[in-house]
Amino acid sequence: MRKILQLYSSLLMMLTILFLLPACEKEDNETLISRNGQNESHQEGDNCMQCHTSGGKGEGWFIAAGTVYTSNLQATLPNGEILFFTGPNGSGTLVKIIEVDQLGNFFTTEDIDFSAGLYTAAKGSETTIYMDTPITSGQCNSCHGQSTEKINTH
């Protein structure tokens, strides 16, 4: 009887380990949204979605993310906003507002429909700068700071 209990105990332990192993991967999408004043983000200027995606190393699967800089491009700009519109220059419907954190980063795991293209704006404490062309992806730092100018305002 003792051998049977040891066998069941070993089997139960192995099954527990098998069920817990997948939990070590970053497959859970948690809700993460940047807020003014927060300072827990990192990697300013990098393409956030390299890690913050299904199967990636980062927590949460970002739908839109990037970094905002001051107009001279020398420092990040904290506590602004990124605005998403259906029309150019702030026209059409305001679809989403994402606050920029204390480190200049913005991100959200909330759903945004980019299928029809959205026009964005970076709003600082003094000005709002509008992007001329619509975007169909929220991977802002995959272009800005790489092949196009960094997102900036003041």
Image (cartoon, rainbow, N blue to C red):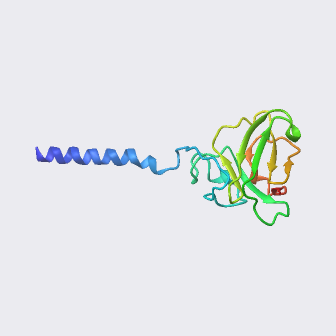
Q: Residue at x 70, y 58 (%)?
A: 46
* Image quarter of the N terminus: top left
Q: Residue at x 76, y 56 (%)?
A: 68
Which residue ends up furthest to the front in the rendered image?
A: 126
Which residue ends up furthest to the bottom in the rendered image?
A: 74
Q: Nearer the viewer, residue 1 or 152?
A: 152
How many marks overall? 0
Percent across and percent down for residue 133 are 87, 43
* Image quarter of the C terminus: bottom right
User: Could you tell whether 38 is left or right of 116 in the image?
Assistant: left
Percent across and percent down for residue 39 are 63, 59
Q: Residue at x 24, y 48 (%)?
A: 10
In the rendered image, which quarter is residue 72 located in?
bottom right
Percent across and percent down for residue 112 are 70, 37
The vertical placement of 7 against 70, above or below, is: above
User: Could you tell whether 142 is left or right of 39 in the image?
Assistant: right
Q: Nearer the viewer, residue 149 or 7?
A: 149
User: Could you tell whether 20 is left or right of 150 in the image?
Assistant: left
Q: Nearer the viewer, residue 62 or 75?
A: 75
User: Could you tell whether 53 is left or right of 125 in the image?
Assistant: left
Percent across and percent down for residue 26 are 52, 49
The vertical placement of 114 against 140, above or below, is: above
In the rendered image, which quarter is residue 64 located in?
top right
Q: Residue at x 80, y 38 (%)?
A: 85
